[in-house]
Image: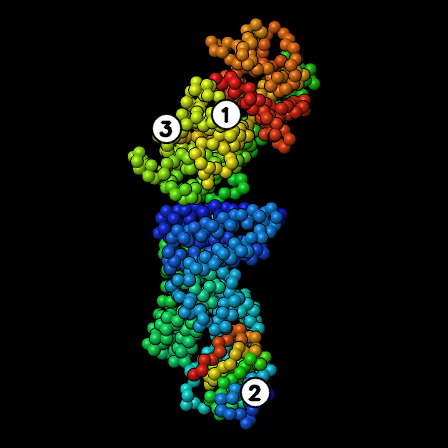
Amino acid sequence: MNDLLEQFLDETRELVQSATEDLLALEAAPGDAEAVNRVFRAFHTLKGSVGLFDFPPWFSLLHAAEDCLSAARAATLAVDSALVDLALETLDATGRWADAVEIGGALPETADAEGSALAGRYRSLLSPGPETRATDAPALPVWASRLSEPLSGIEGRPLIAVRYQPRGDCFFSGDDPLGLVRKVPGLLAVTVEPAVPWSPDDEFDAFACNLAITLVSEAPRAEIETVFRLVGDQVTVVDLPTAIYPRIVPSGTMSAGAPALEPVVAAILAEQVRVLAASDEADTDAGRLEACARSAMNALRSTGRSSAAERCGQALGSGPDALRAAIEAILSNRTDAATPTDGEEAYGASDPLGGDAARTLRVDSARVDVLVALVGELVVARNGLGHLAAQAEAGEDAGTLARAIREADANIGRLSTTLHRSAISLRLTPLSSVFRRFGRQVRDAARGLGKDVVLVVEGEATEADKGIVENMFEPLLHVVRNAIDHGLEDAANRRQVGKPEAGRIRLKAEQDGDGIVVSVSDDGRGIDPAFIRRRAVERGLLQPEPVATMDDAAVTDLIFAPGFSTAESVGALSGRGVGMDAVRAAAARMGGRVSVESRVGLGTTIRLHLPRTIALARIMVVGAGTESYGIAMDAVVEVVRRPRTCVHAVAGGNATVLRGRTVPVFRLVELLGRGDRPLDGDDALLLVVRVNGETIAVEVDRFEARIDAVVRPPASLVGSVAGVGGTTMLGDGRVLLVLDPAGILADASAPAGG
Amino acid sequence: MAVVRRTDAEPGTPVRLEGVCPVEDAETLASLILEDPSAPVDWTACTRMHTAVYQVLLRLRPTILGTCGDPFVGRWLTPPSPG
């Protein structure tokens, strides 16, 4: 994939995101002119970017959307849920098409049909609009529609207007004024008018030229001047900078129904104003006046603005000033209506993304500075080693040398740890990038279920590793949908129990030691442990007796058990064959866990405890049989050596008493299926770990070492092995499998749970 | 010469512009239109129109038939409306 396309896709996704947010804001506050502007700009930019590539259905869809939003911006089209929905659907399609382009380099086959269906809906929004197409459009002659043909895609470019009034005797000198005009590059419009009105009494002289030609071109001024170099005395060339037309330039150029003035019409009008302004009242002869009026009227009529043209016609009778005022009014009406807040801002904002667009990886420069400083220190520390070597060569005594080396080692160790931490922090991303996607999701989910939901987001500035943040969305989305679908009661029920009709979903992130906790809370009906007990037994997950003795928290936790679904019926939203067990699995994949807290009638909170970074983990290397495995130290509560006589065989396994509590004991070799080797030694080496709230002892054969290591998440083949939390490299180059105690004990712990 | 009208034409028979219509055609066209102001002008066969010819149409405003065969005129210029 080339860079341009890649950048395009990135930008497209960002724009889709920001436009989605603005649309939601707009839906909440339909009068927010700034939000309309932002949405318009996003679509405008999207259209422009798509136009760089060859995706015709995409382009025309965005074009139609832009036309509608342009009307909304000019306040001639109401911003209602129909428009917002349509725009959101367009963004959805845009997102999907961007994905398709990324994967296959082409739009999906359905894009054509889908695009034109959506574009049709945009048009139907516009059609009952202000300048009724129904009546004006048929009257539009062929030439007028041709006039607008070359106008697509000219936005943003400066235009040149030329007024060419050939001398009366030019035909005798062999001139063909229109012949010159034919050579003008980048022509956008031409009008030919009598320079002086013909009086019916005059004798007609076919060879006296009495014409004024006005044209608009998008070509560079120099090229246009070259064409007219031989008749320079008869030509006036003026720039029509885009800045004069903040509203006009980005308008939908193809749609006769759109309220915005087409650039060319605006240019023609502006030119008439200029001509009128340039001449003194006294010498503004009637001919010039009429020519100006006719030019303006023709231009306006050509795009179906007969009423505006009529106004010019009336003003013509009242003299040049009235005409000029009338034309200016038509021009400025447009600009005023289009930029209700700030004329410069509306189109002057050259960066449509604003300053805070999310880049692939945005890094605070301060963090880079820290990194640079640390690398500098590391270089200094390394120089110290050279010094040490020199000392050793000079025969420094071993004790002193050893001390110095240890010092250098500690120093470099400190630096490398800090360096690692700083480097890791480069990857820290605020959770807002995930949280902001939920506005849309919650809205759609709530709407789909006919519920009214308020989303509250807290702590979105909390940071975590990019990989964590990116992987968080799916499980979180599932939890949120569950909360809306199953957690929140419907409005009638909520009224009955005295809650506000609108349910509340709170999405919150916070630091928790080295990790982060992302929680989803609802103020719904809560999880009824009695119901869970019943369901667990019905589903055959547990036997009735142990369920009866489990405490409520443990029972509630069963919602994460595979095969458990709390919904009475399969909901459209969350009943997609993915249970909460998928959430638990996803959290575990990220090296985290999930927990639930619920109060009947008050609501449920589901927390994802996730690591903040993929950091250096303290690993304990233990031996099982002939092999070594790593276990993350944070899972290990303590390491104890117990006389084997204290490990008793009990029903279903072994157990020992630790600090007055009975703790189940499992042998690591057995858990790993390495066969039942005879026990050796008098003492059992026990690794006491906490798994899902339970304390369990794992007997290992040896303790080998404690190391700091970067644990890589399990990938490909290893990833599918239960109980493997990741891999890391040992100092001697061996690969160490780092075990996930929860994973390997998943089956074993169940019987011990009672 | 590319301004054509049958000499025995009934009033109202179209004047046809054909092929390249140079500056000289302006006078011919003007006189034909002045002779029979009701005659429409068919410019569909005109492949290139001189400014002077266009000016005649603009000044005398006959009824114009069809779209001008001169691509430049057809595309850019307003057909003078009958006046």
Q: Nearer the viewer, residue B64 or A496?
A: A496
Residue in view at x 38 percent, y 53 percent:
A80
Callout 3 and callout 2 share a chain = no
The residue carrying mark 2 is B3
Q: Which image quarter: residue A186?
A: bottom right
Structural distance between the alpha carbons of marks 3 and 1:
22 Å
First in sequence: mark 3 vs mark 1: 1
User: Is label 2 in contact with label 1 (beta carbons under 8 Å)?
Assistant: no
Count of labels in the image: 3
The image position of residue A373, as x and y in percent, is 55, 32
Q: Which image quarter: residue A485?
A: top left
Residue in view at x 50 percent, y 80 percent:
A166
Identity of the amino acid at label 3? Val
Structural distance between the alpha carbons of marks 2 and 1:
97 Å
**Mark 1 belongs to which subunit?**
A
**Mark 2 belongs to which subunit?**
B
* Label 1 element class: loop
Identity of the amino acid at label 2? Val
**Mark 3 belongs to which subunit?**
A
Q: Is residue A391 left or right of residue A470?
A: right
Callout 2 and callout 1 share a chain = no
Identity of the amino acid at label 1? Leu
Q: Residues within 10 Å of mark 1 (few under 14, many from 20)?
A: some
Q: Which mark is residue A541?
A: 1
Q: Which mark is residue A600?
A: 3
Q: Nearer the viewer, residue A707 or A607?
A: A607
Callout 3 and callout 1 share a chain = yes
